[in-house]
Amino acid sequence: MKLQAVRTQVAAMVHASVLPHSLERMRHERFILTRLLVGAVALGLAPAYLAWRGTLGMLETAILVAAALPLLAVVTLSRTGRLDIAHCISAAALALFIAALAGMTGGAASPLLLWLAAVPAEAMFFGTRPYVARAGGIAAVALVGVMLLDHAGIFAGQADWSREMMPVLVMLAILQAMAVAVGFLLRRREELREHRAADQRAQLLLDHVGDLVTWHDANGAVVFASAAARSLAGAEPRDLHGRGLFERVHVGDRPLFLKALSDAAHGSGSATACFRTLFMPQDGERQHPVSRWLEMQACRIDTAAPGDSAAVVCVTRDITTRRAQEEEQARDHAEAVKASDVKGRFLATVSHELRTPLNAIIGFSEMLTHEGQPWLDAEKRLDYARIIHSSGHHLLDVVNTLLDISKIESGTMTIDQEPLDLTEMTRDCLALMTLRAEAGGIDLERVAGPDLPLVQGDRRALKQVVINLLSNAIKFTPAGGRVVLAVVRDGDVVDLSVSDTGIGISAQDLPRLGDPFFQAKGSYDRAYEGTGLGLSVVRGLVGLHGGRLTIESAPGVGTRVSVRLPVGGVADASQPVRIATFARAPRRGLESKTPFRLTA
């Protein structure tokens, strides 16, 4: 209990600046404890010596001063935290003590001068090479001082009691040397214990932290890996040593990984890299490789010892979730931009498609309301009424198209399947579009294969598909061109196609076909009337029938749109299905031969 109380009092005297540093704090505590002990013993014996000797001489006074100086060193260290200054005071006290004893036991010829070697030796116990150098200088000054004073005749000669006390003084020197040696060994043991405790704390932290900590040599090879290797790299820490971690990095990310290590080791001193790892999970439940996104922060170890193999320390963490969130945010942003673009095209297209027929309806209806106009005869009134009727139908078609595309995109569009004769249905559609084709100077043909079966489908929906395809073909085919509607059987599938010799579609526009309100530009670089929803509606209706839509086109050659429908229909026709649309050049020598995949 008393020893613990002494340790507590000594610890209270340590300066606050060294409290966070365990090794430095122990050095201060050891210095304070030993100097207090020496000073207390020396001053405790001083009254008995005074009673025995009576009047003190100069050298005896110097010995008492040397006994008090360790207490001054303790006060200095406790107030300032400067161990170097306190140790200089302590070394000066020991040197003064030995010099005074040497003066009393023969001066320059005293064998006690050998005791001065204990001054720098004792410095090793508390400090580093600067401490030893300063203590050696103090011992040298004391030796020179004794020699000068002896040469000047200051020392009266050997004291009467020195011969009898010499063995005692030599024993004191031996005891001090032994104390220094034991203290040095104790210091080394405490430092080793502290290092082991620090290593254990660091290892405990590394074993429980979620980030992977690795140390690399100057060439990038791993020399240490923490326990997080099991979760982030799917391997034991020892398996990452050498090139183990590098071999688990995705091949495409290895240059970035090596560059980060090189920049940290030989460049700026720090670097960050994001890379993927591929590994087999250790649980054995999954047979496919696991991929993770990792972020590595590498930093050069500037304080590494010459023989230390570690040159770079890296902290790597799993950012797979963060990466997925960033990608999701990017997709959401792209979708928001696309939605804004679609809204802009919607407003521009619909306003144009509505304004033109509305202007015709309002204008011609106002003319019909004016009575008494001599030029407004019955024939003109009939023409104006037909224009108003046609404009009204156009408005109705626009509204119906918008409603259809809205139902398709929201998933509320349904179809009623029934057996259909596609030969008869395509003949009716061709008859509806014949007048429009003749007005544009376009040849309209139909090709029907033999033995066409009845197809399960919705009559209104498939009729709308054919009319939309024919309308687009006629719209984008110049006068003198040709549009062919073909229906053939291919096993359990019926292929319904519309081919034209129109302006065609450029390669950069192919991937966007089917987007709402998108209308590709032709080789003449002019705009065509329409909402740009026809192909979107076709794609959705074909999807509801479980069909497949293929577009082949090239500028200046023409376009072929093929709809492949299963003869038996689909099991669940109430829900639209996802379909794949391929766009490629229809024949040899055309520009685009790369397939583009679109989904509905």
Image: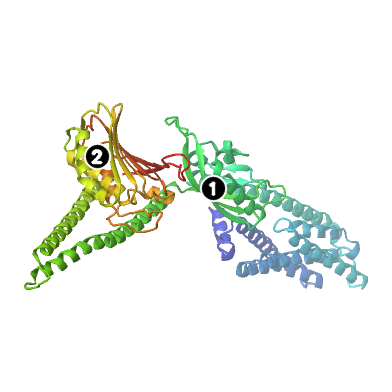
Residue 480 x/y as whole percent: 34, 48
Task: Find numbered disc 1 in the image and state the secondary structure of the residue it sits on.
Answer: helix
Looking at the picture, how far across and down is residue 568, in whole percent?
23, 29
**321, above or below 341, in the image:** above
| Mark 2 surroundings: few (<14), some (14-19) or many (≥20) residues within 10 A | many
Residue 14, given in percent of the width and then of the height, sits at 59, 63
Camera-side residue of 235 and 472: 472
Instruction: Give the number of the disc on residue 300.
Output: none
570 lies above or below 470: above
* Disc on the earlier residue, 2 or 1: 1
Which color scheme is applied?
rainbow
Secondary structure at badge 2 equals: helix
The amino acid marked with disc number 2 is: Leu
Q: Judge whether 571 appears above or below 353 on screen.
A: above
Residue to which mark 2 is pinned: 544
Quadrant of the drawing holding the C terminus = top left
Between 153 and 589, the residue placed more toward the observer is 589
Question: Decide: marks 2, 1 in contact (CB < 8 A)?
Answer: no
